[in-house]
Image (cartoon, grey):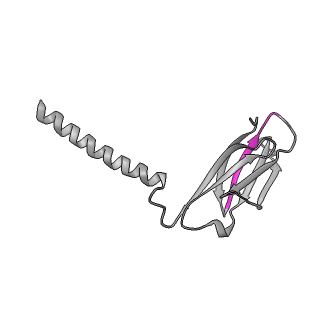
Amino acid sequence: MSDLTLTPIRLRNGTWEAQIKGESRDRPQIHVTLHGETVDSVELSQDPTEGGWLLKVRIPPESITDGVQTFMVRDGADDSKLGTFSLIAGEAAGEDLRAEVDLLREELDMLKRAFRRHCLETM
């Protein structure tokens, strides 16, 4: 298990940024993958203001497609998962978790209205 922690900062101008901190002062080995393929546009530099390391991942243009694209960030020393970030574009897949959550919210609202109506009618 990695002692590194990953804190997302922002996504700006096609570059996702995060801060990495850990007990060791040694430069961490960070691997970023998309669909099991290594993303080559990864930069890691010391963060002079906060300590730790600043991770920058330039989003490959070919990865910007319809649906959900989830990037996995791993510690190369022990291959443990540090975190993920996702891009959603175009027509998201019907089985996408976000679409399912929206459907569940709609059903919950419908059940709340029916329950309230039932309570009023039985009083």
Residue 80 belongs to the span the image colors magenta: no
The secondary structure that most of the magenta stretch takes on is strand
- Measuring from the top left, give residue 45's x and y in whole percent: 82, 51
> Which region of the structure is painted magenta?
15-23
Q: Quadrant of residue 78?
A: top right
| Residue 106: % across, % down | 33, 49
* Nearer-the-camera pick, 17 or 98: 98
Figure check: 39 above or below 51: below
**Quadrant placement of the C terminus:** top left
Q: Residue at x 48, y 51 (%)?
A: 97
Q: Against 100, is 120 above or below? A: above
Query: Whole-percent x and y of residue 69?
Result: 59, 59
Q: Please tell me how many numbered marks the rendered image carries.
A: 0
Measuring from the top left, give residue 68's x and y in whole percent: 55, 59
Residue shown at the point (67%, 69%) measured from the top left: 61
Q: Is residue 21 magenta?
A: yes
* Residue farthest toward the bottom in the current orientation of the protein: 62
Closer to the camera in the image, 50 or 39: 39
Which residue appears farthest toward the right when viewing the image?
A: 26
